[in-house]
Image (spheres, grey):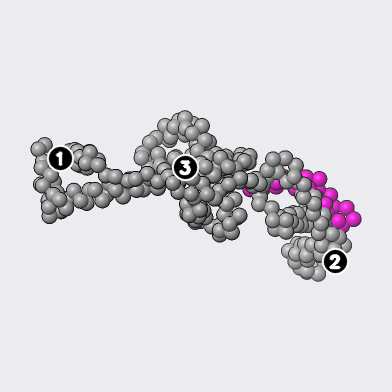
Amino acid sequence: MKAKKTKTKENKVLLDIEVAQEQVKKKYDEVYEKIGQEAKIPGYRPGKAPRQILEQQHGALARDEVLKSLITESYEQTVKDEAIDVIDLPQISDVKLEGEVLTYKAEVEVKPEIAIKQYKGLKLKKQEIKVESSDVEEYLKQLKKGRSEGLSEEKLARGLGYKTKEEFIDCIQKQLFLKKENEERARLEKELIQQVLKQSSFVVPQTLVTRRAHELEHEAEHQMTSYGLPPERIQERIKEFEPKFKAEAEEQVKVFLVLEAVAKLEKIPVDDHVLNRVVEFLFAEAEWE
């Protein structure tokens, strides 16, 4: 088998593939063997009909089966051999089977080549986390909503299972600190990712964007269904939020591709946890102020 790879346009590759005569002949033998076992030929038991008879009666079927099988096998082998990162099904064209040699073209969309100028030593500044008395007061205010007016902190604390008001306030402060700590982590992560995106340049494949946008639509539809919204109202909302879904999808795909590119550069395993691992790596390599 021979294959030639040519970059045709942004995120697309054209493969010129040739399957040798011996491979075609072997595949024809396999196909006719199967046809001979399954076809009902008058005057012959299954598997006993001569090849010539099978060719006369089932030649078109055999050719279709050979082409389908060989194109699938040779395309998949070429993608593997050339390490092509495909993101969609190929467009097959110019299929020719002459002199028992198969040739065809396959154009396929691939993940973009991503150049990142810098991803180590990015500057980050962590903000000091403080829980102010006003934060505790606001928390208590929200907690008292819907409860009896004039409820003291002491009674509220005991009603929630705390021995003293001080123990209750201490617990609130710890919860608020943890909340602020998580918010600061999210802010730093967002800033870090935005810096990496600014250091990269590539065209986002619209196939991936469209696919992700549809996933977001299905998630929203499922959520609205669980809330009991009628189907017609759900479709109205989906239509209304289409631009938002597309924008979110484009951003998510962009982030995933850039972080995946960092993972490959740093030989970080690309699995379900790759994004978290890359973010932790970037944090470790950052220049903290």
- Residue drawn at x 36%, y 40% as measured from the top left: 227
Q: Tag on residue 178?
A: none
Structural crowding at the residue carrying mark 1, measured as other residues with C-alpha within 10 Å and reported as few (<14), some (14–19) or many (≥20): few
List x then y, in percent, for residue 198. Answer: 56, 40
In the image, taking residue 248 as reference, residue 2 lies left or right, namely right
Q: Distance of mark 2 from mark 1, alpha carbons?
A: 91 Å
Query: Cβ–Cβ below 8 Å for labels 2 and 3?
Result: no
Q: Nearer the viewer, residue 231 or 204?
A: 204
Q: Tag on residue 191?
A: 3
Taking the view exactly as shown, the residue that stands out farthest to the right is 99
In the picture, the quarter occupied by the N terminus is: bottom right
Residue 53's quadrant in the figure? bottom right
Query: Cβ–Cβ below 8 Å for labels 1 and 3?
Result: no
Quick check: 30 above or below 114? below
- Residue drawn at x 77%, y 47% as measured from the top left: 6
Q: Distance of mark 2 from mark 3, alpha carbons?
A: 72 Å
Counting residues from the start of the chain, the first of labels 1 and 3 encountered is: 1
Q: Nearer the viewer, residue 1 or 182?
A: 182
Q: Nearer the viewer, residue 124 or 28?
A: 124
Q: Which residue is mark 1?
A: 147
Quick check: 268 above or below 224? below
Residue 104 inside the magenta-drawn segment: yes
Structural crowding at the residue carrying mark 3, measured as other residues with C-alpha within 10 Å and reported as few (<14), some (14–19) or many (≥20): some
Q: Main secondary structure of the magenta part?
A: strand
Q: Which residue is mark 2?
A: 50
Q: Nearer the viewer, mark 1 or mark 3?
A: 3
Q: Nearer the viewer, residue 106 or 110?
A: 110
Residue 96 inside the magenta-drawn segment: yes
